Amino acid sequence: MSNSVSTWRIVLAAVLDFLTVFLLGGFVIAALTGNTTEGGFSLNGWPAVVLLALIVAYFVIGKRLGGTLWKRILGAVR
């Protein structure tokens, strides 16, 4: 029996992970820096760089811990 994970689960997990960290991280950073808008948030300059660093850190740490949040939820951990 093969120990492979469906490609769609891996792709869906990556998309959901990105959206989760982008939206939650973006809103928290925006709230801390006063960049919230009526429709959500708008990050420019260093707050946007901080969000990018947060997204990269999330995926690096997730890989080191054996899977990100959505990979674990969807059973896409190899």
Image (cartoon, rainbow, N blue to C red):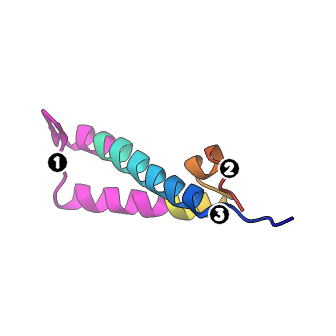
- Asked if the magenta segment contains residue 37, the reply would be yes
Q: Crowding at label 2, few (<14), some or many (≥20) Cα neighbours within 10 Å?
A: some
Residue located farthest toward the top when viewing the structure as drawn: 38
* Residue that appears at 48% across and 61% down: 57
Residue on which disc 1 sits:
42
In the picture of the structure, the residue carrying the numbered disc 2 is 75
Q: What is the quadrant of the C terminus in the image? A: bottom right
Which residue is found at the position 16% from the left and 36% from the top? 39
In the image, what residue type sits under mark 2?
Gly
Magenta span main SS:
helix
- N-terminal of the pair, mark 2 or mark 1, is 1
* Magenta span: 28-57
Q: CA distance from mark 3 to mark 1?
A: 31 Å
Label 3 secondary element = helix
The three-letter amino acid code for the residue at tag 1 is Ser
Q: Earlier in the sequence, mark 2 or mark 3?
A: 3
Task: Give the answer, above or below, for where 35 lies relative to 66.
Answer: above
